[in-house]
Image (spheres, rainbow, N blue to C red):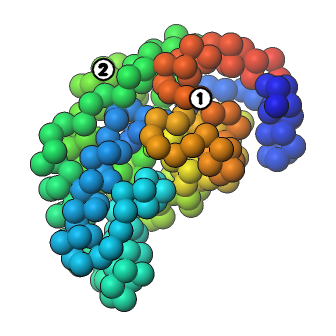
Amino acid sequence: MTLQQTIAEYLRFTGHKGFDISAALIDCDGILYDSMKYHTLAWVKLMKKNGIKCTRDEFYAMEGMTGTEIIKMKFKSGAGKNITDDEARALYGVKTRYFKEQGEAPVMPGAKRVLETLKEAEVERVLVTGSQQDALLQRIDSDFPGLFGEVKVTGHDVRHGKPNPEPYLKGMSKSGKKSNECIVIENAPLGVQAAHAAGCFTIGVTTGPIPEKELYKAGADLVYKNMDELAAALPALLVALSIVKA
Ligand code: MG
């Protein structure tokens, strides 16, 4: 598909006449940090300790759901247990400990370049994550100084994790933007689904084991191989979108 066809398809799906992009809603894990391998290892350890069979791939596929949603689902399907909110929170505390024990997840190569390119183009950067991992969230302002503003949406702000569009709708309302004023940058199929459902032009980046076609299937408008490739493509993409005026 050409970029023109991609844009036409987006406009047909959303009913918008065009774009006025002034914000990028940006996911955290697998976009700003190369953290998903740490998360999936922590999840597998938690499940094994509780006698629940699982694979790491399952947790790559569930990325974007809140931690407590994942726990409730896996304990139900894997052990026939109904977990209360309090139990889920306690188990999530254990998972968080396993995550931290592995050391600090590295900053994703190319992430800074993407943020700087957006800043140069005067596109506001808004964090939108289902993550409740405070240790990682607190690093963002020091790892990406001056690149994020005050507006952030985290797992603490939403009732429903991705693929529910709530996190992205909240990102839009908190920053006072409409869906055709935002692009979304996401790595997870459920995150892409959430962004697409929220009506934003959705950019997928395959930074993990999940193939490109899964992100297109989830509703991504465009998919890039990594954050460096996205950074290189962004200036021309922003110009192409700005030509199709709302
Ligand atoms: Mg992610």
Q: Where on the picture, by quarter, is residue 31?
A: top left
Asked if residue 119 can be seen in this view, the reply is no
Name the quadrant containing residue 177.
top right
Picture residue at 82% right of the left edge, 47% below the top: 13
Label 1: element kind? strand
- Residue 224 is labelled as 1
The image quadrant where one finds the C terminus is top right
Q: Residue at x 62, y 48 (%)?
A: 214
Residue 78 position in % (x across, y down): 37, 80
- In the shown orientation, is residue 205 left or right of residue 116? right
Q: Does 190 appear above or below 31?
A: below
Residue 86 lies, with reference to residue 125, above or below; the image says: below
Q: Where is residue 134 in the image (x, y as percent from the top left)?
A: 24, 47
Looking at the picture, how far across and down is residue 149, in whole percent?
A: 40, 28
Circle on res. 145:
2
Kind of residue at badge 2: Pro
All told, the count of numbered labels is: 2
Q: Is 100 placed above or below 110 here?
A: below
Residue 232 seen in render = yes
Mark 2 vs 1: CB contact within 8 A: no
Answer with left or right where residue 101 lies relative to residue 31: left
**Label 2 CB less than 8 angstroms from ligand 1:** no
Is residue 69 toward the left or the right of residue 121 in the image?
left
Q: Which of 84 and 229 is in front in this view?
A: 229
Check the image and report above or below for 142 versus 172.
Answer: above
Compare marks 2 and 1 and give the one earlier in the sequence: 2
